Every structure is written in structure tokens, then in C-alpha cells.
Amino acid sequence: MISTNEINETLRMIDHEKLDVRTITMGISLLDCVSSDPEKLARNIYDRVTRKAGQLVRVGQEIDREFGVPIVNKRVSVTPIALVSGAVNDVLPTAYALDRAARETGVDFIGGYSALVQKGMTGADRRLIESLPQALSETEKLCASVNVASTRAGIDMDAVRLMGEAIVKTAERSGGIGCAKLVVFANAVEDNPFMAGAFHGPGEGDTAINVGVSGPGVVKSALEKVKGQPFDVVAETIKRTAFRVTRVGQLVAMEASRRLGVPFGIVDLSLAPTPAMGDSVAHILEEMGVEQCGGHGTTAALALLNDAVKKGGVMASSHVGGLSGAFIPVSEDIGMIEAAAAGALSLDKLEAMTCVCSVGLDMIAIPGDTPSSTIAAIIADEAAIGMINNKTTAVRIIPAPGKDVGDEVEFGGLLGRAPVMPVHRTSCERFIERGGRIPAPLNSLKN
């Protein structure tokens, strides 16, 4: 039984602390759309997505209105396209079909223009990677991801090199914004509801409803009430708050599942910030006592936050999944933006922070003339963290054409704005040219 006090507490979190459901994402399998005719494959995909997700936006709006819980985005994720396009030589028609389907259904984004290449690449994988610059510059709602590493397989350095080149070309063709829709993963999960990295994994069923909740403002507000208290109290406070936030996500997920007739998948517990004041993960860390995000103590504070969010949220939902932790996207978090602009937050510090939180180097603008080999090496470093620590890591990095350190890039909306951050100028060419595969670590042998 839900008490009156719990209802009032939830309403306060929504009204004053920016609690929202960041996304309802419908996962859709495309495995029965396969055809050797590129146009027929594209048509099959368009028909299936529009048929399955045709009511998603309407249902999301109804739940928002009836329950009073803001639902910011409605999204679709599909089977990694490289898995269903192996019989065609031209994968671009599927990109355009997905984008048309997203516009027809009214969803904000559609993810799954993806490939899983942690151990090697098929012809379909290579064709998809090579198509990324054109696909992402000529579509509006399409999101893409490529998994280049895993704890079990190691790191495919040939794929890493190709992704460095693809990111540079995508930035050139799209003015940078295309790179905001492209994620490079290690240990990618199959049920992630957040863009740009969402796809409906091959281990998933026909369809699923996955929900991502968010409440950095709620957590910060709770910590303001325990100023000066020991970290034991801080952790317990975050756990209790994460429980309440996740219960809201569970309620919305179950209701959407019932109304759409689609199985409930997971609730993702991730704290996803926005550029709005009062909705910042960085400000949570500063509330713990770090003077500015990026200073000494930041990594420890983030580790506590990430762990406490998981511990509190896992008790609140019947199925927890996705990424579930704390996101640190620079352009999407006002505290991160401020810290990067002040020079307190560097790329190296962000890399250290990714060892203890969800995902990785996210929405980071770098100079437009950064070589593809440097970007590939950044990807390799981040993939190594994921591989060794058996966790999901990712890189969403944006070379800003014509921009240099000290300039700022404006993306708009939830993507926010980002100061251009410096990268190391030492050459990575010889490292990346080696290619091959970095072997899986010893801790992968768990059987």
C-alpha cells in the first residue's frame, strides 16, 4: 500500500527537484525482416517499426498526463542492423527507413544502427561502419553504436581504428552533431534504454518496454539535509532516495507495458543529468564536499554515488538492467560544463572517473583537427577500462570542426553545450597501425 506521505514526497520531487522518467524505450526485434533485396529489407523494417511502435508516443503522453510524471522522451531501439543486413551490399536504405519510421511514429530517437565487432568483423559489420558518416549526416533521429571490446573477447583494434576514422568523417560531414548520435562501446548491454547507445540485443524477445529514470536534483536535495554527516549517512541517504526514484520508473514501465501489450523489460537506474540548473551529477559530487567536479576526491565521491544508486534502486524494481548508475556527459550536465570551462575537469580525470561509474567518456567536444589515430587511442584506453573491470564503458566524442581549445560548441536541447577540451598531442599513429586484437584478460576465464 502506498501511503499519502509517499505520494506527497513523489509530487514534491517532480515539482521542485526535476524528477522525471527520462525515456520509455520500446525494443523491437528485426530478425524476421531479413531479405537479400536492400529495398525490401528497408520496407520490412519500416513496416515492422511503425506497426509495433505506432502507439508508443500516445501512450507515453497519456501516462504523463494521468500520473503527473514527466516523460521526457519516447524512443525505439532495434536489433543491431549489421545482424539483419548481411545479405545486402548497401546498408544505407535501412538507415533511411529507420529515420522515416521514427518520424512516422513521432518518437524522439531510434537506436540500433549498430554492429557487434568485439572479436572480429563480418562484411556486414564493415559496411555498416563505413556507412556511418553518410547515415548520421543524412538522418535526423537515427542513433548508432558499435561494440569493439568485451571482457570475454578482448579489444578488436582493427575496429577501433575504423571507428576513429568514422568519427572524424562523421564530424566533417555533419558539422559535429552526427557524432552526438554515435557511441563506441566495450561490454555493451542488450537492454539499454538510453541514446545514443540503445539497441535491442539478439538475446532479447520480440519486443520489450525499457524505462530510464533520472533524478540528480532529487539526490542533491536529499544530501543538502545531511550536510557534514559521515559518508555512511551520505550513502544511506542516496540509497533511500534512489529507491523512491526507481519506484516511479517501475510504475511507469508496468503501466506502459500493460497499455501497449508489450512485455516489461527493465528499469535503468542511471542518474542522467541535463543542462538545466538543479539537474547535475557534478553538483551532487560537490554537495559531498568536492570544491569543484574534477578536483581531488571526485573519483571517490562518484564511486560512492554510483554504488549507492545501484543498491537503492535494485530493491525497488522487479527487473533492473541497462546501465544503471551515474552518467557523466560533459555537455549535458551544467556542473560538468562549468568545471570543464574552468579547467578543473580534464579528459584524463574524466577517464579516471569512468572506472567507477556508468558508461564512459560522454559528449566531450575536442579540437576539430584531432587526428583519427588519437581518437582511436582514446577509444582503446576506455575499452581497456571496460574489458579489465568487466563493466560497460563507452566513448561519445565530438571533434568540433573549426573549433579549438577554449571555444564552445552548442548542440541544443538535452544535448546542451560543451567547451572544447584539450587532448594529448603526442602521436598515436604507430600504436593504432598495429591492428589485430588485444587479448582478453585472465579474469575472463571464469568457467
Image (cartoon, helix red, strand yellow):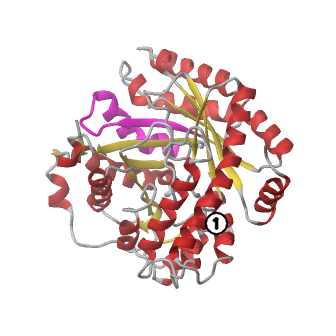
Residue under the point 30% across and 44% down:
150
Looking at the picture, tell me which residue is in the foreground, 131 or 328. Answer: 328
Q: x and y percent of residue 288 in the render? A: 55, 77
- Note whether 421 is above or below 189 in the view shown: below
Secondary structure, mark 1, is helix
Magenta region, residue range: 110-138
**Residue 342, can we see it?**
yes
Residue under the point 84% across and 58% down:
8
Crowding around mark 1 (Cα neighbors within 10 Å: few <14, some 14 to 19, many 20+) is many
Residue under the point 65% across and 23% down:
52
Q: x and y percent of residue 353 in the render? A: 40, 67
- Which residue is denoted by mark 1 in the rendering? 219
Quick one: quadrant of the C terminus? top left
Q: x and y percent of residue 422 in the render? A: 38, 74
Residue under the point 47% across and 79% down:
406
Q: x and y percent of residue 17 in the render? A: 74, 65
Q: Is residue 122 magenta?
A: yes
- Note whether 12 is above or below 314 in the view shown: below
- Note whether 129 is above or below 293 in the view shown: above
